[in-house]
Amino acid sequence: MNSAQAFAGSLAERSADVLDACTRCGRCVEVCPMVEPAGLDASKARGIVSGVLELLAGGEGTQGAATWANVCTGSGYCIPACNDGVNPRFMLGLARTAVRRREGSEPARRDGSRVFSGMSRGVRVLSRLQLPPDLLAKINPRPRRGDGREEPPDVVFYTGCNVLRTPHIALLCLDVLDRLGVRYQVMGGPSHCCGIFQYRAGDIEGAGRVGFNTIERLGGAGTGEVLSWCPSCQTQLGEVTIPTFADVNGAEPFGLTPYIEYLASRLDRLAPFMTRPVERRVALHERPVLPGVVDAARRILRAIPGLTLVELEVPRVGTMSNSLSVLPRFKAELRDREFAAAEAEGVDTLATIFHACHREICHYESGRSFEILNFMELVGESLGFRHEDVYKRLKLMQDVDAIVRDTADLAEHHGLDLDDVRDVIFTDMLSGQSVGVVPVTEDRRL
């Protein structure tokens, strides 16, 4: 049995476990922040869940169930709400693949391949428009396998794919590990994809093949701890792929820890190095997908001298900003409410945590009373590290020709095709569209 078949078989068994455990109580629907904006009726929660389970069982489900699965943004409020031992976020992912596969496995495979190819091109072009080869190689080294002669690193820093579009974040992460004296190996980029693009498209076989390959590569480093940066990778590997890998192979290959949680667990070692005052009133741009990451980021920021952390009374929704593109109007309303709250609280800085959030909102600082930085820039400032946020500088230009002129030397140095460059700048940086996300009709608003 190959990896794709093993993955699909394990998922089928886990789907059966969900069907056995779920009592259709509807609590997951009642706490979901996407239900009302998607035009669903929370009073019909039991019926919506029943439709989801019908999808998992191979049936047609209901329109409400399909809509709920399609608008799931991974917030995770449903997980602690369930008293039956079910992870509703995982359940909805299974339902979404069932909806995608209604037209057959071949269209799902084509869709997954198309979205993955678009992501790979965007990562390749945008990372090269910002970094020379030596720095790019630091955060995206060529894949290699251990030969048994090198001592295993303390950790693997797993970048995922898309943080390479905002490479200053990844460089700062490595600076901090260097300061802590941590021995690490960097893995990531499209060659180490977690499989989420294939999985969301309904290409279960492709997701299994890609995900198992990445797990084997990460495990090949010989360390027991992998630090993930991307929350989508953390949930895809941590909730979908590693459990299926363990089902097939009898054991989990390594521990998967969010990078920021790892830093917070070593705050006693990190804090003595954070000696430079950062005199700012800072609010975090929070996402609820990984509550431990938000708590860890707050702890770290509170340890920075001179920094005042301000809490904003706004809704927290989704995995990252791009996940909300399924309901564009709802996404814009949440963003406007947060910006208004930040201005009302007199913050100097709105700090994003994750890379996709940073990509999508960084340019909105233009004309506002606060700047938008990534959380790691504040940590770096307190440690004396700095890497220019080239992505934000380019995006603020809001002009394809101006960006092409600005990046011409690096584009030529990396041998990038000019038509590719122009197209990626427009589609990936300036258009505001999220690759592979299909908007859903919005019937209700906040």
Image (spheres, rainbow, N blue to C red):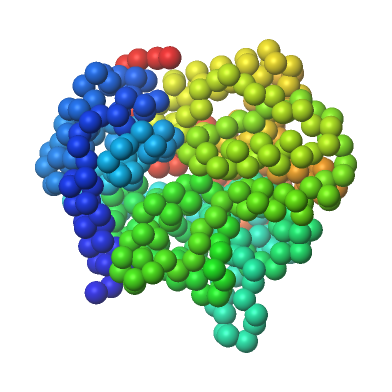
Q: Is residue 217 left or right of residue 26?
A: right
Q: Which x, y percent locates residue 324?
A: 45, 31
In the rendered image, the quadrant that contains the C terminus is top left
**Can you say whether 439 is above or below 131 in the image?**
above
410 shown above or below 443: below
Residue at coordinates 63% horizontally, 16% vertically from top-left?
341
Q: Is residue 354 visible?
A: no
- Residue at image coords 51%, 22%: 315
Q: Is residue 407 visible?
A: yes
- Give residue 1's quadrant in the image: bottom left
- Reply above or below: 140 against 334: below
Left or right: 24 in relation to 114: left
Percent of width and height locating residue 55? 17, 41
Q: Nearer the viewer, residue 82 or 207?
A: 82
In this view, the residue farthest toward the front is 83
| Lateral position of residue 40 relative to residue 160, left or right | left
Q: How many marks?
A: 0
Residue occupying the point 72% across, 58% down = 177
Task: Tell me which corner region of the image, top left, top right, bottom left or bottom right, holds residue 30.
Answer: top left
Describe residue 254's horizontal placement relative to residue 286 as left or right: left
The spot of residue 311 in percent (x, y) is 65, 24
Residue 170 at x, y percent in the picture = 66, 52
- The quarter of the displayed image where residue 187 is located: bottom right
